[in-house]
Image: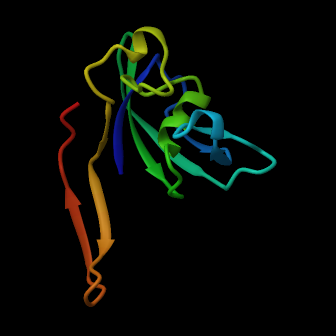
Amino acid sequence: TYVARVRGQMREKIGTVDLPLIVDWPNRPRQMVDHQNGKQAVTDWRVSRVLEFETRVRLFPKTGRSHQLRVHMKEIGHPILGDPFYAEGEARDFPRLMLHSEKLRIRHPDGGVGMTFTAKAPI
């Protein structure tokens, strides 16, 4: 589970982005949407709080593509604040990328025991 601050007010409260991604070779490491050659990428999202110029949103990636959350939010018109690759103008002028991994679930490599790590978002 991720928490992000994104540009603008999101009108819907919940949704899914299902857009295939591929490396933007001339602009590596950037990724881009490519409906013909891209690999499936799916992100569920849920609004936590809407402010005047931004929205705080929880992101739930269903696949694990590079820059998936960043590209998906940009593609629906709400780039993540502080993103040096996908945000423009004032949305880019933040001291860091406003994206935080709040919860991580893994299976321990020695025995497969499920483990969960949480870290409250500082953004």
Q: Farthest residue toward the right?
A: 36
- The percent position of residue 89, horizontal first and vertical second, equals 46, 9
Question: Is residue 97 shown above or below 110?
Answer: above
Please tell me which residue lies in front, 13 or 117: 117
Question: Is residue 115 shown above or below 88?
Answer: below
Question: Is residue 122 shown above or below 6?
Answer: below
Residue at position x 73%, y 42% in the image: 34
Q: Farthest residue toward the bottom?
A: 111
Quadrant assignment for the C terminus = top left
Residue at position x 29%, y 60% in the image: 104
Can residue 47 be seen by looking at this rendering? yes
Query: Picture quarter containing residue 115?
Result: bottom left
Can residue 24 be seen by looking at this rendering? no
- The percent position of residue 44, horizontal first and vertical second, equals 52, 47
Q: Farthest residue toward the front?
A: 26
Query: Picture quarter containing residue 40?
Result: bottom right
Residue at position x 26%, y 83% in the image: 113
Please tell me which residue lies in front, 7 or 26: 26
Please tell me which residue lies in front, 58 or 81: 81
**Number of disc labels:** 0
- The percent position of residue 41, horizontal first and vertical second, equals 61, 52
- The percent position of residue 79, horizontal first and vertical second, equals 49, 25
Residue at position x 67%, y 55% in the image: 39
Query: Coloured how?
Result: rainbow
Q: Is residue 52 left or right of residue 64?
A: left
